[in-house]
Image (tube, rainbow, N blue to C red):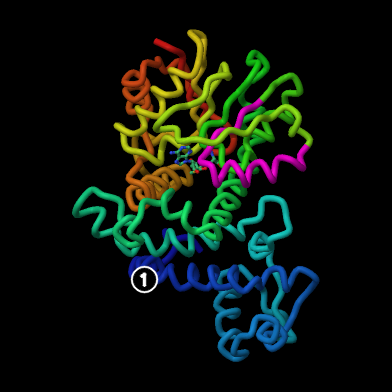
Amino acid sequence: MTAQDMPPPIALFRMVTGYYVSRAVHLAAELGIADLLAAGPQGSDALAKATASHGPSLQRVLRLLASAGVLAEEADGRFSLTPTGNCLRTDIPGSMHAAALVFGGITQQAWSGLRHSVQTGKPAFAEVFGAEPFEYLARHPEDAAAFDLAMSGFTRMIAGAVAAAWDFSSFATVMDVGGGNGMLLEGILAANPGLRGILFDLPHVAERARERLRATGVAGRCQILAGDFFEVVPPGADACLLKHVIHDWDDERAAVILRNCHRAMGPNGTLLLVEGVYPPRIDTSDAAISAASNDVNMLVCTGGRQRSEQEFRELYKAAGFRLTRIVPTPARVCVIEGVKA
Ligand SMILES: C[S@@+](CC[C@H](N)C(=O)[O-])C[C@H]1O[C@@H](n2cnc3c(N)ncnc32)[C@H](O)[C@@H]1O
């Protein structure tokens, strides 16, 4: 039943209490419930034993998850995974386990300061955690590893769509600036055997990317560099690719990153941003929900924003680029191309 099909007070109450299910999914991720159910249904007592939990209380949470379609309660009272719940397993491609930990964890805590963001225009994350998100992650390796995994879970779904929607064959070397653990670059290099790649990210992220990429088939064509994109973006690529990086920053800081990309590339360098384009009007479509949700999440967490086509044009201009085309992909992100102006 969608919100439109419900009596309005019930629809509103479901929205207000949406965090009940969100908290339960987060707990299920922390306890590793989906991995425990991967081999088949189990009763709440067995799950409680395996997770050092209080059985009757865990059962109540598992039933809440069953009411939300994350688990199914079998006729004999045992619980099994639904296709949605299966995504909480850690051992499947495109796992949402890390996303559940991050977005139901530190992100949700940051959202407790939404009012602060709206009153001050400043990200609540720094208010709640006493540090900006990427500083916080640098100091909390476990959260940082989960964040990289969460991002790469989304990116794994997007990489194929980007590689199919965009022809990279005219480039010799593409640099993924703020490339996380390299999932996008890996997908693009795999689809383009003549292409070389550079992954550039903060030192602790680059280190994890090096570890992960070492075991992939593209390792021989991929260089990993560490640094700070507010200081300098290293030279060596004819295209700079930035996926879900620019939306993290306000216009001023976004322009600094793009100017550093501009400096790093020769006169024919190409800028490729991969992220959503904010639609002219918000309705209840999936695309609008995604744009508006991401936008407020950026307000709360990083102080960044989702941008409209016009806002991207202005940003490109401020950084010395001309926006030349926007290519949609089936993955709800666009490739936003710029050339040196
Ligand atoms: C939202 S994540 C996107 C990761 C990746 N592009 C993806 O879409 O999966 C932003 C990335 O920017 C990186 N980053 C943040 N500040 C940075 C800086 N000052 N210099 C280089 N990279 C930075 C983060 O470490 C992170 O990997």
In the rendered image, which residue does mark 1 sit on? 13
Q: Residue furthest left?
A: 119
The mark total stands at: 1
Q: What residue is at 30 percent from the left and 51 percent from the top?
A: 123
**Quarter of the figure with residue 45:** bottom right
- Report which quarter residue 113 is drawn in: bottom left
Q: Is residue 329 left or right of residue 256?
A: right
Tell me the quadrant of the picture where the C terminus can be found. Answer: top left
**Residue 320 on the magenta span:** no
Q: Position of residue 224 (x, y in %)?
A: 62, 34
Q: Is 211 in the magenta?
A: yes
As drawn, is 251 to the left or to the right of 57?
left
Give the camera-side residue of 70 and 211: 211
User: Residue 22 or 125: which is nearer the viewer?
Assistant: 125
The residue carrying pointer 1 sits among few (fewer than 14), some (14 to 19) or many (20 or more) residues within 10 Å by Cα, namely few
| Residue drawn at the location 68% of the way across and 69% of the way down | 34
Q: Position of residue 332 (x, y in %)?
A: 53, 38
In the picture, measured across the screen, residue 159 lies left or right of residue 122, that is right
Identify the residue at horizontal 61%, vertical 28% (top origin): 198
Residue 185 placement (x, y as % from top left): 64, 33
* Residue for point 58% across, 38% down: 331
Closer to us: 74 or 99: 99
Query: Residue 14: x percent and y percent?
Result: 41, 69
